[in-house]
Image (cartoon, grey):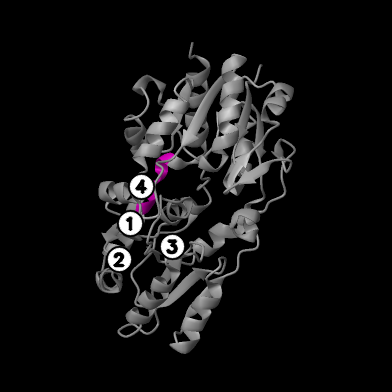
Amino acid sequence: MYKPKILLISNIPAPYWIYGSEWLRLDFDLTYLCYDRPSETGRPQYWDQELPLNFIICKDRLKIYNKYLDLKISTRIRELNPDLVILGGFAEILSNYIAYRHCKKNKIKCAMVSEIWRNRSGTPRRLLSYIVSKIFNGIDCFLPVGEHAVEYWSDFFPKEKLHLFRYPTFIDEYMKHPLRKKKNDLTLFFGHRLTEEYNPLMAIKILSACQVKYPKTSLLINSAGPLKDKILNYINENNVTNVRWIDIKSYSDLSIYYKNGDVSLSPCIYSNGNIGTLEASASGMPILISEHVHYHGKIINKFKNGFILKLSILEFVRKIFQYIEDDELLTCHSNRSKKSVMELNNNEFLKIFSESVKFTLKKK
């Protein structure tokens, strides 16, 4: 049985793609070409995985204002001779254009994956999106990540060129975690990296405010990120207790930590939506997010598995108290969280990826 040859170009070998490739190899001859290790782009060290043979890091590339330029990309495509080239995100935009032009010239099918492009305030970058749609106007297929992105990119590409895409999430292990039950000593969970946009200091302040009434409240918090020293100083200066650090050694161990959390916190200043919140939902945690977290807000509005809040310590604390004091709310939202991500399991990812490939290869 012939397996279509797929070349996927991205900036880093994200661990979820490494696990995803194991499933994709059942139906596809996949090569994943990228330009840096995750830790070289600010991702946590545990994202650096041992790479399968079909993952290639091309260090002989240029990097201009954090954008990759691979002058050998045409040669690499010729050598790999794929049926389909799938172009990754914004960081590879320079190399992606060269790859796109090569594919057009040599009649190789070409698709492009993208989320909604936003600035740091969360506002969609519509002018840039428009420019990109004109530069890549001859692309065979454009693959927006998630239904909200399909709606957004339909303003820039013809609808007949759009097809829903999803990243691999591999939440099956998380789905095995039990539903959360009512208790007075909740463990709050902050799984994001310690960076400004994820606002970890506010998570510490939320914990401290909760402890005024419920002193046994604790916080599990990711230890990876540039703000750790700042967080430690605040904890020491303000005598904050019951903070437990998540010291992740391997991406494959991540689900163990999620199992110990009760309520997921995302008091973000900005987020385009992230896989960690989907993993928290699969684990069965209710989700508390700020109004500046995109994508997940639509899930919460649909499934009612948490709350979308203003960037206010008091608002977060009030909802946490509801989970402690209401007899049924925690378990109710825990159950709804699991239901909200049912369509993101391994089989569903493989199905959507396969549909995307078939959709693009059929394009004339």
Which residue is depicted at the point 42% across and 29% down?
133
Bounds of the magenta span? 337-343
Which residue is depicted at the point 41% across and 70% down?
188
Is residue 134 visible in this depiction of the protein? yes
Q: Quadrant of the N terminus?
A: top right
State yes or no: residue 230 in magenta.
no
Residue designated by label 3: 198
Tell me where residue 205 appears, x and y as whole percent: 38, 77
**Pointer 3 or 2: first along the chain:** 3
Q: Examine the rendered structure and indicate whether residue 288 appears above or below residue 213.
A: above
- Foreground residue, 42 or 255? 42
Circle count = 4
Q: Counting other residues with Cα less than 10 Å from the Cα at mark 4, is it few (<14), some (14-19), or many (20 or more)?
A: some
**Which of the labelled discs sits on residue 292, or is there none?**
1
Q: Counting other residues with Cα less than 10 Å from the Cα at mark 1, is it few (<14), some (14-19), or many (20 or more)?
A: many
Measure how far apart labels 3 and 1 are at the Cα level. 10 Å
Residue designated by label 2: 311
Residue designated by label 4: 295
**Pointer 2 or 1: first along the chain:** 1
Q: Is residue 299 left or right of residue 248?
A: left
Kind of residue at badge 3: Tyr
Q: Is residue 150 left or right of residue 242?
A: left
Eye-nearest disc, 4 or 1: 1
- Foreground residue, 198 or 327? 198
**Pointer 3 or 4: first along the chain:** 3
Magenta span main SS: helix
Tell me where residue 175 appears, x and y as whole percent: 47, 51
Measure how far apart labels 4 and 2 are at the Cα level. 17 Å
Displayed quadrant of residue 228: bottom right
State yes or no: discs 2 and 1 in contact (Cβ < 8 Å). yes
**Pointer 4 or 2: first along the chain:** 4
Tell me where residue 268 appears, x and y as whole percent: 38, 62
